Image (tube, rainbow, N blue to C red):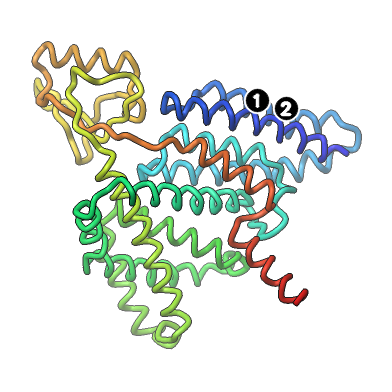
Amino acid sequence: MLEDLISTLNFLCIIALGIATSYDDIRENRIRNRYIAYALLFGVCTNIMLPAISIGGMYFSTEYFRDTLLNAAVALAAGFIFWSLKIWRAGDGKLFFTYAFLIPLSVYIYGYVPLFPSFSLLVNLFIFSSLLILSNLWMITDSGEKSNVIRRVIHPWHIIETVSYFLSIQWLISFLPFLWGIDPLYLIFSIMLLLTLLLSRFRETALLSIAIALLRLFLDYGNVLNVSFITNLAVLTFFVLLVNFVVQLGSFRFNDRTSISRLAPGMRCAERIAKRGTKYVKCTEQCNFLNLNYDSLSQKDVNFLKKLQAEGKLGFDEITVKHTMPIAPFMFLAVIITLLIRSDIVTFLRVVSIRLKYIF
């Protein structure tokens, strides 16, 4: 059967991609673009060329190919969001997009999300990687570092922002009919990601969200002031704060000041550089940044920065470098788990609990 053949070929490609990228990410803290390119080319051959040349494969090639492309496009957008949040590197986003393109849609039996079946893979990735990263951070950080981050995360204004964003976003979404049939888990996870993005990158929208939230409390208080809604609000707020805690604790712990003379290829810069007059300075606002690969410095980038320092054109001697944990092994593990349980772990546990009720 054509679908079985495609699934088998893509599975073999996934295993090869997972082993190669995990090895390189652990050893060199990077994901080679050629691995991504080879895997995508293989996916094009299996998902497009093979159905097109197979007898009776026209329906499969149009419907399946359309759904595969839509899923991959949303996965690419998700990867971009996590890259913009500085949670993933650019290579991690591209790797997630590649896995989303390679995993056959028929794998997702339980909790199938229209347009984005790979949402199950995303959930598995974040659940397992967050648990592993949080446990690692908890062991390597001292009590002072934890207290410092906790105080920042649970600051009253931060909590007010989170609650107001949820009240305003969830209310606005309720007016979109095409989202009414979407799985609540998908909507909640999407809102959580949007909240994290807004809180980390667009703080100027906080006053607008507070205004909308107050308007909702006045007009829609019947739906807001009930136990079920308040419980959901508390749970979502907790998860958003937990994500911020993990991100800030990791940033607080893994950032390091490195002298320009000790920079090496592959290092990830946490700060950006811009030209001011005759000097090059570190810039945290929107500037005309120097064109460097900040996610992974190349040898050319390192030589250029050292040359500027030797010429006295740098306005600083040190730059903040991030020591990141490899994401590729976590992503490969999430892919294997997704292939085994054929859904996300939350939906899988729900299905198992329902079946156990019928048995007992």
As drawn, which residue projects farthest toward the right? Answer: 55
Q: 63 or 354, which lies in front?
A: 354
Residue 158 placement (x, y as % from top left): 25, 64
Q: Quadrant of residue 12?
A: top right
Q: Is residue 295 above or below residue 196?
A: above
Q: Residue at x 35, y 66 (%)?
A: 165
* Left or right relative to 309: residue 55: right
Q: Quadrant of residue 230?
A: bottom left
Q: Is residue 224 above or below residue 95?
A: below
Q: 248 or 52, which lies in front?
A: 248
Element under label 1?
Answer: helix
Q: Residues within 10 Å of mark 2 (few under 14, many from 20)?
A: some
* Left or right relative to 68: residue 21: left
Element under label 2?
Answer: helix
Q: Residue at x 73, y 70 (%)?
A: 355
Q: CA distance from mark 1 to mark 2?
A: 6 Å
* Left or right relative to 273: residue 42: right
Which amino acid is tagged 2? Cys
Which amino acid is tagged 1? Leu
Q: How many marks?
A: 2
Q: Residue at x 36, y 36 (%)?
A: 324
Quarter containing the C terminus: bottom right
Q: Quadrant of residue 222?
A: bottom left
Q: Residue at x 42, y 70 (%)?
A: 235
Residue identified by numbered label 1 = 41
Residue 252 placement (x, y as % from top left): 25, 45
Q: Are marks 1 and 2 in contact (CB under 8 Å)?
A: yes
Residue identified by numbered label 2 = 45
Residue 202 placement (x, y as % from top left): 29, 53
Quarter containing the N terminus: top right
